[in-house]
Image (tube, rainbow, N blue to C red):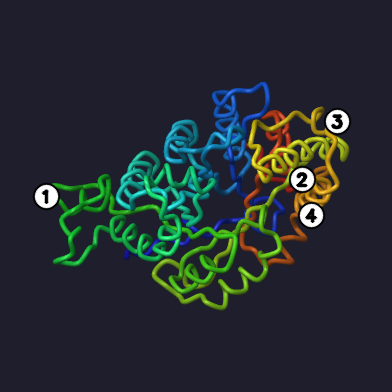
Amino acid sequence: MDEIRGDEIRGKAEGTATVPLSVLDLVTVGQGRTASQALRTSVDIARLAERRGFHRYWVAEHHSMPGVASSSPAVILAHLAAHTERIRLGSGGVMLPNHAPLVIAEQFGTLEAMAPGRIDLGLGRAPGTDGATAAALRRSDRLNEGADDFPQQLAELTRFLDDDFPDGHPYARIHAVPGPVQATAEGGVQSPARPPLWLLGSSGFSARLAGVLGLPFAFAHHFSAQNTIPALDLYRESFRPSAVLDAPYALIGVAALAADDEREARRQVLSGALSMVRLRTGRPGLVPTPEEAEAYAFSPMEREFVDGWLTNIVHGTADEVRTGLDDLAKRTGADELMITANAHGGEARLRSYELIADAYGLPTD
């Protein structure tokens, strides 16, 4: 494996931030909004993130959820690449068991050719949906097999990306294109560079695997906060230096939303909490408006869930959010914070990222 430059993984903190700040986008669709509007909002946020000095912008793979329009990360990333110039773009993540490794290698090789040196390939082993939808995606009901085979699938994907199957392997004469084979073909001039791999997780499995392989690790703190520190500890304890990294690099996804006042921030995050209640109880839908969320009669069990959910969302004024993010970075030792804002409207999400950038004194152009 060719050594990957450190700046393709390790971010640089801007302004007064203690660690680099990045963005995770679920392309949320609110009631009364369309997927087209949500995707236009993603372009607006990506441009804002680039202009204000956020380090990277990732898109997450989800399926069969009306309020989340990010079922095809590679397609969305190609669109974002056409509307940005510098910011790193990537998947947070592509769910590897849902796809043939060769297909992912081809898709992200294409993205790398479109935006050289700007593409990250983050991989998860969960389906990003319910079991029935996962079976439809994979045309198989052997869902546990996909998770159990994750290390083997990862090894196969890496071979395709590096174009280095050994002689005699059934895939030795198969090449992911665009990819390194074009640089070695007669007359070839294409760069052999390929996107750096990240492992994503919400428990210890991928944390340990990322450490053993010497890969960067991204943890889903935004929906598995109780496992964050144990998983990061396991990653660091398991880490073995590699051609990719000489020391651990851990990013955590953080749910955060800033508004001009505390009440407005509370209104916005409550709509996301109601959306999650409905998802967890088998009633997925579009993200409700803040007005509907405020008027909703939560059952005692739902209220308990919402109170716990909101505890792990950093929200309030810009200064309050900054304090919360700084405390989280210090408590977890994370090397990078990736902020996701789940709200009904694109305006609230854009305003939140602008306010956070202002609070950290990030560049204005």
Real-space Cα separation, disc 1 to disc 3, in angstroms: 67 Å
Lateral position of residue 59 relative to residue 340, left or right: left
Real-space Cα separation, disc 1 to disc 4, in angstroms: 55 Å
Q: Which mark is residue 359?
A: 2
Q: Which residue is mark 3?
A: 295
Within-10-Å neighbours for mark 3: few <14, some 14–19, many 20+: few
* Residue closer to the observer: 177 or 275: 275
Labels 1 and 2: the sequence-earlier one:
1
Real-space Cα separation, disc 3 to disc 2, in angstroms: 32 Å
Residue type (three-letter) at the residue carrying disc 1? Glu
Q: Which residue is mark 1?
A: 186
Q: Nearer the viewer, mark 1 or mark 3?
A: 3
Labels 1 and 4: the sequence-earlier one:
1
User: Which residue corresponds to the image point at 53% horizontal and 45% vertical from the top-left?
Assistant: 60
Label 3: which secondary element: helix
Residue type (three-letter) at the residue carrying disc 2? Ala
Label 2: which secondary element: helix
Instruction: Determine whether label 1 and label 4 are within 8 Å by CB.
Output: no
Within-10-Å neighbours for mark 2: few <14, some 14–19, many 20+: many
Label 1: which secondary element: loop
* Residue closer to the observer: 231 or 143: 143
Residue type (three-letter) at the residue carrying disc 4? Gly
